[in-house]
Image (spheres, rainbow, N blue to C red):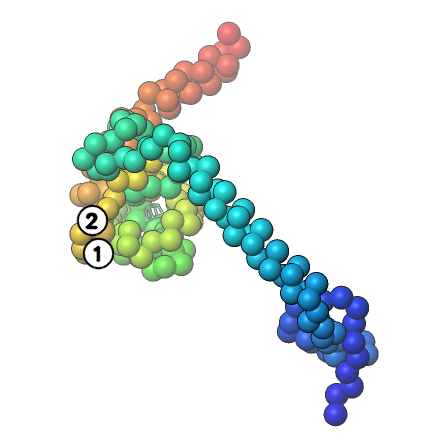
Amino acid sequence: MREMRETRGFVLGPYNPSPTTGLVDVPPRRRLTVWNALWLIAEGAWTILVGHWVTLRNFWRKKVTDQYPHRQARRNWLPGPGYRGDFALITDWKTWELRCIACLQCQNVCPSGCIHITPEGRGRERHPVEFYIDAGLCQYCWLCVEVCPASAITMTPDYETAVDTPRKLIRDIDYLRTRGLEFDDVQRPLEAQQTAEAEHEDKGE
Ligand code: SF4
Ligand code: SF4
């Protein structure tokens, strides 16, 4: 039979045996006295009061209910940097083709298995003919973006992705290309500015 010994103070279970002695420490029984009972009641009452104080404090504050999506209080609001929103495939400005080279790395790395690509062609001609992402399965881990060798896939700041059926969360290649072009319109001035600054530094001006 396992030997038991008492410890000082209260211990929250489970009561595992000590790895060195093999003994099980059990908490001492708390004797219910009048003072103990009063103290427990006071503790409980204080907890309730603190909880209600938070509710009361906010009860008198100005209401900021947003009738989304019919009326948005903060129009053109965008989430902060690093937000992972809807997917997009980036188009190459020079060839006007998708940057994607259908290497399947994003499909293979995806832990949710929500990317499906059908590649076509070999070598430099290789490209995707089908590219599906099931945003309903996605856990927005960013791995597909990180692993892409062509910087062809990204996640935009677009957070308005609510739909009425899960099927509508499956993004196809046309959707992703269009989102990429919209996203690029936002990013392009920033990239052009950074390129100009880099060239300026290279010239040592
Ligand atoms: S963000 Fe993660 S879960 Fe979503 S498609 Fe990319 S790799 Fe898969
Ligand atoms: S999006 Fe990037 S990682 Fe995915 S198949 Fe295309 S090139 Fe490869």
Q: Is mark 1 within 8 Å of ligand 1?
A: no
Measuring from the top left, give residue 172's x and y in whole percent. 20, 49
**Left or right placement of residue 175 versus residue 6 in this view:** left
* Mark 2 surroundings within 10 Å by alpha-carbon count, few (fewer than 14), some (14 through 19), many (20 or more): few
For residue 23, side relative to residue 203 (left or right)? right
Image spot of residue 32 (x, y percent) = 68, 71
Find residue 199 and report its image quarter: top left
**Any part of residue 152 in sight:** no
User: Image check: 132 left or right of 85?
Assistant: left
Q: Position of residue 134 (x, y in %)?
A: 27, 54
Residue identifier under label 1: 166
Vertical comparison of 53 with 168: above or below: above
In front here: 150 or 56? Answer: 56
- Quadrant of the image for the N terminus? bottom right
Comparing 71 with 191, the one in front is 71
- The amino acid on which the numbered mark 1 sits, given as a three-letter code, is Pro
In this rendering, the answer to whether 166 lies above or below 180 is below
Q: In the rendering, which numbered label is found on residue 163? A: 2
Residue at 19%, 43% in the rendered image: 175
At x 66%, y 68%, the residue is: 12
- The answer to whether one can see residue 52 in this image is yes
Q: Secondary structure at mark 1?
A: helix
Q: Is mark 2 within 8 Å of ligand 1?
A: no
Which residue does the image show at 34% across and 53% down from the upper left? 138
Q: Is residue 163 left or right of residue 205?
A: left
- Callout 2 amino acid: Val
| 150 w.r.t. 205: above or below | below
